[in-house]
Image (spheres, rainbow, N blue to C red):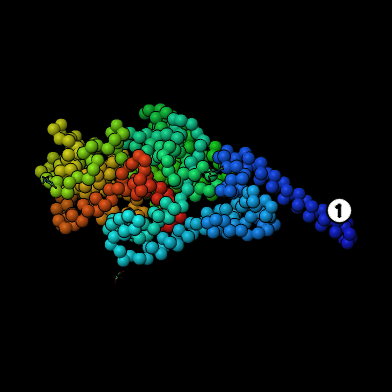
Amino acid sequence: MLAMMNRDGVTVWIVLLSSVFAASIAIVFLIGFFSDKANVNGFGPFNSSYEAEFDIPTVELVTTAARTRDGESRAVLSSEFSSKFKPTVRRRQNSKLEQGLAVARAAIRKAASNRNVSLIIKNSDVISTAIYRNAGAFYQSYMEMERRFKVYVYKEGELPIVHDGPCKDIYSSEGRFIHEMEHGNNRFRTSNAKAAHVYFMPFSVTWMVKYLYKPNTYNVSPLKEFVSDYVRLISRKHPFWNKTQGADHFMLTCHDWGPLASSGNAFLYNTSIRVLCNANSSEGFDPRKDVSLPEIHLYGGKVNPKLLSPPPSNISRLYLAFFAGGLHGSIRPILLKHWKGRDQDLHIYEYLPKDQDYYDSMLKSKFCLCPSGYEVASPRIVEAIYAECIPVILSDHYVLPFSDVLNWDAFSIHIDILEIPRLKEILIAVSEDKYLRLKEGLRAVRRHFVLNRPAKRFDMFRMILHSVWLRRLNLRVG
Ligand SMILES: *[C@@H]1O[C@H](CO)[C@@H](O)[C@H](O)[C@H]1NC(C)=O
Ligand SMILES: *[C@@H]1O[C@H](CO)[C@@H](O)[C@H](O)[C@H]1NC(C)=O
Ligand SMILES: *[C@@H]1O[C@H](CO)[C@@H](O)[C@H](O)[C@H]1NC(C)=O
Ligand SMILES: *[C@@H]1O[C@H](CO)[C@@H](O)[C@H](O)[C@H]1NC(C)=O
Ligand SMILES: *[C@@H]1O[C@H](CO)[C@@H](O)[C@H](O)[C@H]1NC(C)=O
Ligand SMILES: *[C@@H]1O[C@H](CO)[C@@H](O)[C@H](O)[C@H]1NC(C)=O
């Protein structure tokens, strides 16, 4: 072998090399074949929809470039094998996923440039453009999501902390999303992990608090450890986390301590998509990669019957503004100090009088105050949307839900904390015209904040997925 100077030696060496090469191809086939058989997702090697992956350079193996049924070119092996199974190489398959995303991005950009529409009516979808930052872009992006988006849900982890979450009370949006993802019959979930755009880690921070946290200790390290262990588990067992350092992975929680729990893994915190109710931009929430989750308070797991359907438009709104709630956090004390029991038009309470009903009061008011409490989000925002009572956002550093696509100025009012003393003056100054436009906006935006079982087009579940989709696309549609 060392006699490479020798002509014959060189020849021998080459022959040897090429037989090693041929043998390695054969081995690759075999490995491919048996790993197909071992595939837990049940895609047999002869299933034409299955695409095997190899972790080896592609160039030598490609003998023909074939076209798949959907017209995207991919590499296949020699023809005698291609009739049985058509392995593609990882880089190729990823590039197929990426190509799809590139097509989607281009279509969205094109749609974004057409701002000359006041109403989009397509395939029986009616999109009132006033409530979006760019309605054309949103609609196109939503359609592209429905066409392509695939989520893989990790199977690792056990009940009750993983694969479940609260579907009642203040953290309902957490449990309802996890349940829909786990059990819903949804077209976005794929059991073929290799074909997924994003990977969902279905743990519940609320259940971590319930089962792992010792009350009154203020020690959140068991939560962080759980998250850290979970990421370690899936990153050892599957190749996906390491490939992107978690950038195409997401978690979701409505608990106030969601951000703290997510700091159990530095990459999860800094790189992954975190879908959070507590979307406080001065506590690490990054709207470019994280998603703001609406908070919904479902007493007993249900929307109050008074808010179930849009209120009649001729309902009389006797009060200028309404708020009832505890002195949580730093903003409410300011609000109550200035306005509690001060003014006949402003119904502002710490404790709602016994003879008054909370939801009736919302339905009777023009404006509903939504100050942050212990954390930035407030379930009052969604309740106000249901009641068509214009939400008055009183918060600092709160990134509003779906503000990646929604123009909140079209259906809410934001008042700076420093302006709280001028609250009444500001609300009175809103013209009747503007008030009616805001109310119309609320009626149009309602469907994005409704939870359905099963999920429906444009509802909250799909809007959350859409926000995740936009982060994966790495596209802003402003
Ligand atoms: C092939 O895979 C698809 C999923 O992509 C599955 O729905 C189908 O049942 C499989 N067919 C067979 C014969 O295994
Ligand atoms: C908007 O589109 C309509 C028809 O498609 C056209 O007549 C009108 O001039 C356009 N308006 C603007 C401002 O481009
Ligand atoms: C991912 O990286 C971690 C840490 O570097 C390592 O322990 C783990 O085995 C890797 N996972 C895979 C599937 O290779
Ligand atoms: C996120 O990244 C920053 C800057 O690199 C780092 O200081 C911080 O510790 C990281 N966060 C977590 C939770 O690890
Ligand atoms: C509102 O309109 C409905 C019919 O559309 C009517 O029955 C009802 O009395 C009206 N209510 C008020 C307060 O005007
Ligand atoms: C948001 O984060 C800042 C900085 O940590 C904090 O001062 C503020 O209280 C937080 N807001 C709420 C409502 O918790």
Q: Is residue 466 left or right of residue 445?
A: right
Which residue does the image show at 25% across and 42% down from the upper left?
Answer: 383
Which residue does the image show at 25% across and 46% down from the upper left?
Answer: 385
Q: Is residue 180 left or right of residue 358?
A: right
Which amino acid, by three-letter code, is at mark 1?
A: Met
- Which quadrant of the figure has residue 6? bottom right
- Whether residue 186 is visible, yes or no, is yes
Q: Nearer the viewer, residue 90 or 355?
A: 90
Q: Residue 252, percent across and down? A: 41, 42
Q: Residue 137, percent across and down? A: 37, 59
Which residue does the image show at 18% across and 43% down from the upper left?
Answer: 363
- What residue is pinned by disc 1? 1
Which residue does the image show at 17% across and 40% down from the upper left?
Answer: 361
Quadrant for the C terminus in the image: bottom left
Q: Is residue 94 left or right of residue 311?
A: right
- Which quadrant of the figure has residue 342? top left
Q: Nearer the viewer, residue 268 or 10?
A: 10
- Indicate the secondary structure of the residue bearing disc 1: loop
Q: Residue 190, percent across and down? A: 49, 44
